[in-house]
Image (cartoon, rainbow, N blue to C red):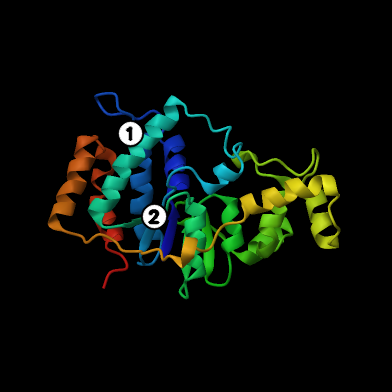
């Protein structure tokens, strides 16, 4: 199974797509790059079900810590991202790819829910280091690729490069903070070296730092189950002739001519994992 962090995938495509736009001025860079990235899966991975994971609504983390991701201001760029994501989701539905979301959950949490219940191999596609805590035998993370070369992360690689086991990754982040999510470190000047020393020595934090640490630990720990033991269904829409028509219509409507020739690869990826 291939689990794709939808927001991470979309933002990477957006910032790689530059200012590409259609003749009527609508920005389409995200669509160009995201579709090309999706089509590239056919040459990078063996056929297996593809699942896109999306955030839905204000995160439970935001309710707990209002400053969470507060540095990500709602600019005109973000508006363009949301508009293009909506179109991209239509394309995913047309080619038959499963998409899941859950109220107040982020894509990271959904990755935790899915991987915790999996007995099969899974590849998580995301550049987000928060997902390191989900790595285990059979679960790997691809943070990017160049040509046919994939940047694959395993639990062993995380420990070798950061000196932290994946089980302790949330603790590590809780100590050093996460600037991308506006989560502060436990104390000014408290960085990776001090965090590793504390983790390896099992020393206790001073009381004045413990409160911040416990809050950060909850924020950085990925949830692995839904409320009230509810289940996450991974059902993909069927591929149909109408879906093919809708795919071509979207590609032409938004003048995605550079990726139009890859529509057969898109269709192949959309059909992965089916009986």
The Cα atoms of the two marked residues, 1 and 2, are separated by 20 Å
Locate the C terminus by quadrant: bottom left
Upstream in the sequence, badge 1 or badge 2?
1
Front disc: 1 or 2: 2
**Residue with the most extreme front position:** 228
Residue situated in front as seen by the camera: 254 or 190:
190
Residue situated in front as seen by the camera: 3 or 116:
116
Residue situated in front as seen by the camera: 197 or 183:
183
- How dense is the environment of label 1, judged by Cα within 10 Å: few (below 14), some, or many (20 and up)? many
Where residue 18 appears, x then y in whole percent? 42, 31
- Does residue 173 appear in this view? no
Write down the residue under mark 2.
52
**Residue with the most extreme bottom position:** 119
Write down the residue under mark 1.
28
Locate the N terminus by quadrant: bottom left
- Does residue 167 appear in this view? yes
- How dense is the environment of label 2, judged by Cα within 10 Å: few (below 14), some, or many (20 and up)? many
Q: Is residue 234 left or right of residue 167?
A: left
Give the residue at x 61% y 36%. Answer: 67
Disc 2 is placed on an element classified as strand
Where residue 20 appears, x then y in whole percent? 35, 30
Where residue 133 appears, x then y in whole percent? 61, 60
Give the residue at x 53% y 64%. Answer: 140
């Amino acid at each position: 199974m291939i689990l794709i962090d939808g927001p991470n995938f979309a933002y990477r495509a957006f910032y790689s797509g530059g200012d590409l736009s259609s003749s009527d001025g609508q920005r389409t860079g995200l669509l160009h790059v995201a579709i090309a990235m999706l089509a590239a899966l056919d040459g990078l991975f063996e056929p297996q079900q593809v699942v896109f994971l999306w955030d839905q609504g204000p995160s439970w983390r935001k309710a707990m810590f209002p400053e969470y991701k507060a540095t990500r201001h709602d600019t005109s760029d973000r508006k363009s991202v949301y508009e293009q994501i909506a179109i991209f989701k239509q394309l995913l539905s047309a080619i038959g790819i499963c998409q899941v979301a859950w109220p107040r959950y982020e894509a990271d949490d959904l990755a935790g829910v899915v991987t915790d219940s999996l007995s099969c191999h899974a590849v998580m596609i995301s550049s987000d280091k928060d997902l390191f805590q989900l790595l285990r035998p059979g679960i790997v993370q691809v943070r990017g690729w160049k040509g046919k070369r994939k940047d694959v992360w395993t639990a062993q690689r995380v420990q070798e490069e950061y000196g932290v086991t994946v089980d302790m990754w949330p603790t590590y982040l809780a100590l050093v903070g996460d600037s991308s999510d506006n989560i502060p470190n436990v104390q000014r000047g408290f960085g990776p070296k001090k965090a590793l020393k504390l983790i390896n020595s099992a020393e206790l934090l001073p009381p004045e730092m413990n409160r911040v640490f416990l809050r950060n630990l909850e924020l950085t720990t990925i949830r692995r189950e839904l409320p009230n033991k509810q289940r996450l269904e991974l059902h993909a829409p069927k591929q149909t002739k109408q879906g093919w028509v809708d795919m071509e219509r979207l590609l032409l409507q938004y003048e995605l001519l550079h990726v139009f020739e890859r529509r057969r690869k898109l269709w192949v990826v959309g059909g992965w994992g089916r009986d």
